[in-house]
Image (tube, rainbow, N blue to C red):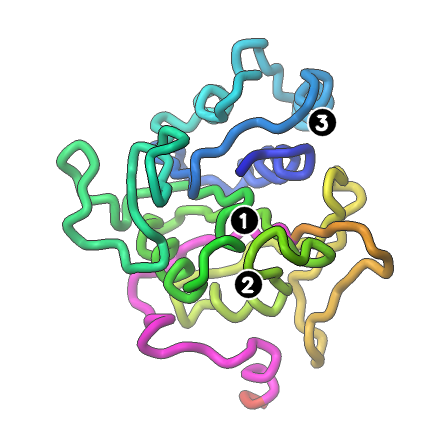
Amino acid sequence: MGIDITGLDAVCFSQQFCETKKNMLMIGRQGLHLYGKHVLDTISRKYNIECPDYVFTTWAEPFFNFLGHERVDSLDYSAFEGANIIHNMNKPIPSDLLLNNEPILNKYNYILDCGTTEHIFNCPQVCENIINLLDIGGIYLSVIPNNNLSGHGIYQFSPEFFMTAYSEKYGMKVMDLYIAEVNAQKDRWIQCNSYSGWRNMAKFNNTNEVYIIAIVKKISNIRESLIDNPPNQYSYEQDWKK
């Protein structure tokens, strides 16, 4: 799990959506997989961020502290990479799961997934957990496989997945949605946060590896449960409403 060129661009771009940066959570402890400080410098210049050398370390916490996130936690299935919250995301987050004697539900202002969800079998529960972990106004950034990464994880994800799982019915709103070839910077991404009367089938017509990048905001705790009241595909539901 780690932040590459595309992930770094997505992280920097998504900061504009953050209302506050008190508590941040990484799903899986994230490292910086940039293969040279020049990559960090290139992205930093684009967003007018002057990164000091100390943020270019194995793990990403110093970088997020530099971006203004006061506390950076990480959640993983085991502690083998140093995550400070241990939980299997296939299962619901217990209401009594505490960190420093405080519940972690409804806590986080920013949650990052740069390559974890595709490895977890119970995707609906992962989505439900992420929604429950976010505070109102909190942002979820996901950079996970879309195409040509078969075998990397269990799943690859379409735009329809995010439009379906993170809709207003479930207390969420998709703020921005893109597909991007691996290691492509933002000027080469395809924006796909739209519904034009047919299924959202945005794609690159090649065999390159492709990510999907979603920036999602939690807007309400008054919502349906993805587990108890699962959705139908977004575009179909829009057609039925008509």
Question: Three-letter amino acid code at disc 2?
Answer: Phe
- Which mark is first along the chain, 3 or 1? 3
Is 93 above or below relative to 1? below
Residue on which disc 1 sits? 142
Residue type at numbered disc 3: Lys
The magenta stretch spans which residues?
A: 212-239
Q: Where is residue 207 in the image (x, y as percent from the top left)?
A: 83, 56
For disc 2, the neighbor class at 10 Å (few under 14, some 14 to 19, many from 20) is many
Label annotation for residue 46: 3
Residue at (57%, 27%) from the top-left corner? 32
Graded by Cα atoms within 10 Å as few (under 14), some (14 to 19) or many (20 or more), the crowding at tag 3 reads few
Queried whether the magenta region covers residue 76, the answer comes back as no
Residue 185: percent from the left, percent from the top? Answer: 75, 38
Please report contact status of discs 1 and 2: CB closer than 8 Å, yes or no: yes
Q: Is residue 235 magenta?
A: yes
- Judged from the image, the secondary structure of the residue bearing numbered disc 1 is strand
Q: Quadrant of residue 110?
A: top left
Disc 1 to disc 3, C-alpha distance: 21 Å
Q: Which residue does the image show at 17% across and 39% down from the upper left?
A: 102
| Mark in the foreground, 3 or 2 | 2
Q: Which amino acid does label 1 sit on?
A: Ser
| Residue carrying label 2 | 162
Q: Which of marks 1 and 2 is nearer the N terminus?
A: 1
> Quarter-wise, where is residue 49 in the image?
top right
231 or 79: nearer the eye? 79
Depth-wise, is mark 1 or mark 3 nearer the camera? 1
The outermost residue toward the right is 206
Name the residue: 45% across, 78% down.
Answer: 231
